[in-house]
Amino acid sequence: MQFIDLAAQQARIRPRLEAAMQDVLNHGRYVLGPEVGELEARLAEYVDALHCIGCASGTDALQIALMALDIGPGDEVIVPGFTFIASAESVMLAGARPVYVDIDPETYLLDPERLDAAITPRTRAIMPVSLFGQCADMEAMETVALRHGLVVVEDAAQSFGATRHGRRSCGLSRIACTSFFPSKPLGAYGDGGALFTDDDELAEAVRLVACHGEASRYRHTRLGMNSRLDTLQAAVLLAKLDIFDDELMQRQQVAERYDRLLQDVGTTSTPRIADGNTSVYAQYSIRVPRREEVRASLAEAGVPTAVHYPVPLNQQPAVADHNGRLSVTESVCEEILSLPMHPYLEASQQERVAQALQQALAWPYRA
Ligand SMILES: *Cc1c(COP(=O)(O)O)cnc(C)c1O
């Protein structure tokens, strides 16, 4: 059993992938070739945003967004304590300071109730992370942002394709960032990312920052990066986009099957999918007591697992902040466990996971 089975997906569309890659080999425009523009147009339409700009990774996308917004030294950005390192790393790479806020105990997403207490005169942006595949309460984020003159930057690295009240993730904030890392819901065969916005001026700033701040040939009007989406990756993504909606339905079915199977297992809980949300289930995660023992037992039964994430960001040495505690984040970090999740997971495999989990949870009584 694979944690994420990229080979099953590849087998389904292999001829299409090969043809798409061959086209790039034939035209030879490896950087900013025609596939990049085509993909940007299709993705913008998909999320109903005016602009999509490709870049080299999800982490770069976040840094580019902040740089394009002129957020840097002396500024603060609110980030949930429970997320992947990149959310905070990008803030620090832009020269600003991440301020960690705790998560909602039911959804594990940035808790809007706790924003006001974290806002200072230096706060410039709120970065809700659409963790595990569903959006945070974006209306509440926007309300707080409007009240304090802040910008909302969605970290949608795990949620491309998700919806909130019928609108897609990446189209719900002033600017949004996603990732095409191979294991993400829409994954390339290497690194890649994209930014989305409806704001013409901001889109122009993003394009400049992503490409050396070059306004015209060798005229550099602002500090930028070298962060473009490879043509080959765009070609791969175009081929995968054709089956993406179908894969999202399959992900939904896999998640529903887990929901049913785990009801009978007991002593586990999953993050609640908030009202109005659909999730793309970048991860199917559960909370279990004695996680390390449960993991070991599952591994013995041939069930691969992962932990997203074991350490609250305020305690990660590279981005630590020792002001205050994040009690919900801390308790979730101790118990969270991700199960195999991908569109091609079969019912029989999921039954095996549930059985192994049942056994694992009975562990102390088995000896
Ligand atoms: C994967 C991920 C990123 C970074 O994306 P990369 O493409 O790997 O740089 C950022 N934030 C979150 C929440 C992620 O899961």
Image (cartoon, rainbow, N blue to C red):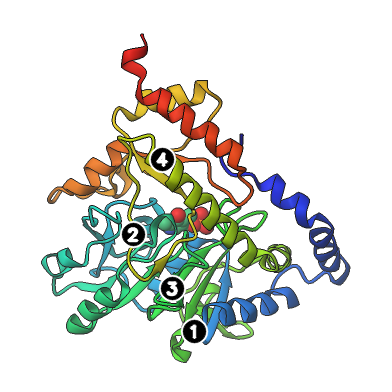
Q: Are marks 2 and 4 in contact (CB under 8 Å)?
A: no
Of tags 2 and 3, the one toward the viewer is: 3
Amino acid on which disc 1 is placed: Ala
Q: Is residue 23 above or below residue 215?
A: above
Q: Which residue is mark 2?
A: 92
What is the number of the mark on residue 262? 4
153, above or below 342, in the image: below
Q: Relative to 32, say whether 360 is above or below.
A: above
**Marks 2 and 3, how far apart at CA:** 18 Å
- Work out whether residue 285 can be spotted: yes
The verdict on label 3 being within 8 Å of ligand 1 is no
Q: CA distance from mark 1 to mark 2?
A: 22 Å
Query: Which amino acid type corresponds to the residue marked 2 in the rendered image?
Result: Met
Q: Earlier in the sequence, mark 2 or mark 3?
A: 2
* Callout 4 amino acid: Leu
| Circle 3 crowding by C-alpha within 10 Å: few under 14, some 14–19, many from 20 | many
Residue 33 shows in this picture: no
Crowd around label 2: few <14 · some 14–19 · many ≥20 (10 Å)? some
Q: Amino acid at mark 3?
A: Ala
In terms of secondary structure, where does tag 2 sit?
A: helix
Q: CA distance from mark 2 to mark 4?
A: 39 Å
Q: Nearer the viewer, mark 3 or mark 4?
A: 4
Q: Nearer the viewer, residue 70 or 80?
A: 80
Question: Do residues under tags 1 and 2 come within 8 Å of each other at their CB atoms?
Answer: no
Residue shown at 64% from the left, 54% from the top: 190
Tell me which residue sits at (49%, 51%) in the image: 255
Residue in the foreground of this view, choosing between 85 and 32: 85
- Disc 4 vs disc 1: which is toward the camera? 4
Query: Along the line of sight, which residue is nearer the eye, 362 or 110?
Result: 362
Q: Nearer the observer, disc 3 or disc 1?
A: 3
Q: Give residue 203's mark.
A: 1
